[in-house]
Image (cartoon, rainbow, N blue to C red):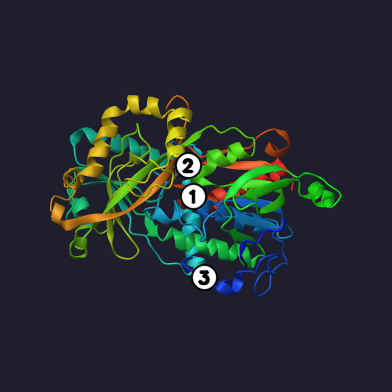
Amino acid sequence: MVPSLRYLGSACGLARGGFPGGFSGACRPALGRPRPLCQGGRQASTSSFDVVIIGGGIVGLASARALILRYPALSIGVLEKEKDLAVHQTGHNSGVIHSGIYYKPESLKAKLCVQGAALIYEYCNQKGIAYKQCGKLIVAVEQEEIPRLKALYERGLQNGVQGLRLIQQEDIKKKEPYCRGLMAIDCPYTGIVDYRQVAVSFAQDFQEAGGSVLTNFEVKDIEMARESPSRSEDGMKYPIVIRNTKGEEVQCQYVVTCAGLYSDRISELSGCNPDPQIVPFRGDYLVLKPEKSYLVKGNIYPVPDSRFPFLGVHFTPRMDGSIWLGPNAVLAFKREGYKPFDFSARDITDIITKSGLIKLVLQNFSYGVSEMYKACFLSATVKHLQKFIPEITVNDIFRGPAGVRAQALDQDGNLIEDFVFDGGVGIIGNRVLHVRNAPSPAATSSLAISRMIADEVQQRFKL
């Protein structure tokens, strides 16, 4: 069956550095076999690819770009379930280019974040994508936080983070005149960028190199091709069939999944291990009113609690000049539940029955209650923010956007801290590479992750 898909080729409404808000209708094919890539590029059939990447977020697009630049002779396709690219975690994050200070030394997060930050800055310079290297202060406001702050500083040095220094009250005031604190880590290498803009630029690079992006393709089944006289040749060359919810399908030799909030389900569809399970955590942001934006110059973060992967409520300047405050971290009742009352019975059932969430809740009950309270009452969040900037009041803020973090959780209720990449066994499993856990700082790390994925694909699939 030849699919009738929304098919995006090079120069199909993807202006360099633009937004994927509306792709050119000239590139939407009629039913049946799609047209070749717009304005040049390889003739590519949407029915078969050498490699398929499932997921059109920043990690999937960076990986597709890395693979086609390394293997220009291969036909490579990206499948995205939404009509546009990078609309979930990529399009709902804080936009911070992280320096790599937080992560356990020698972990993948530490290595790939430090490498990835340098690559993101370099890429943005090459492509003319706007960013601001506005820096970050990690501020201790209580005496008991200072030992943790100093330990974090040492960790950052071990990770090779550039330009770190410990500063005292007077230097805090020089950088952030309205911020109070006893001691802080100055992270001048931290920046901000619009990651959705970066992701769309990755997509353009990929398409200009001959890659294909198929949107409106929500994967439902992954199975081996059924050989028959009419399709035995394709069945031997492209043995994997990926079918969507409309019954449309593509065939391929190898699969890389970068499915974010659905990484566990896509793994299970391919016959691989569904663990670790994904538990969605919603983060709600507040926004500082424009007339109060002078209170914040750069990123201001609290000293993190090492028991949790969440960095705590912080102050984040945005590329449009606004200041976001947050996020909190509360359980989302739907994998793409950006509103408090979004609900999916299937998602909740999976969370309760398949993951270790109940154990996590029991282990951290007071923390969870605190986060829920802050989500309901603005005054509770403002009280926390006032520890850093006393001048902020409830009247200075309004409710802003929200994001959902795909957090991997094991059966014992432990949050999986590091990036996880794996494959499987069997006919399909041997042809699949899964990106299983890639929350923050995955956007910062995306170019470094993509290099690692390209290396792994080369080794695993013998390309």
What's the residue type where badge 1 is placed? Ser
Query: Can residue 176 be spotted in the picture?
Result: no
Residue indicated by mark 3:
16
First reached walking from the N terminus: tag 1 or tag 3: 3
- The mark closer to the camera, 1 or 3, is 3
Residue indicated by mark 1:
445
Disc 2 and disc 1 in contact, CB within 8 angstroms: yes
How busy is the neighbourhood of tag 2: few (under 14 within 10 Å), some, or many (20 plus)?
A: many
Instruction: Label 3: state its secondary structure.
Output: loop
Disc 1 and disc 3 in contact, CB within 8 angstroms: no
First reached walking from the N terminus: tag 2 or tag 1: 2
Q: Residue furthest right?
A: 229
Instruction: Label 1: state its secondary structure.
Output: helix
Task: Please give left or right for residue 130 compared with residue 371 in the image.
Answer: right
First reached walking from the N terminus: tag 3 or tag 2: 3
| Real-space Cα separation, disc 3 to disc 2, in angstroms | 29 Å
User: Residue 277: horizontal and vertical position, in percent?
Assistant: 49, 34
What's the residue type where badge 3 is placed? Arg
User: Residue 377: horizontal and vertical position, in percent?
Assistant: 19, 44
Vertical relation: 93 (above or below) 222? below
User: Residue 211: horizontal and vertical position, in percent?
Assistant: 65, 62
Residue indicated by mark 2:
109
What's the residue type where badge 2 is placed? Lys
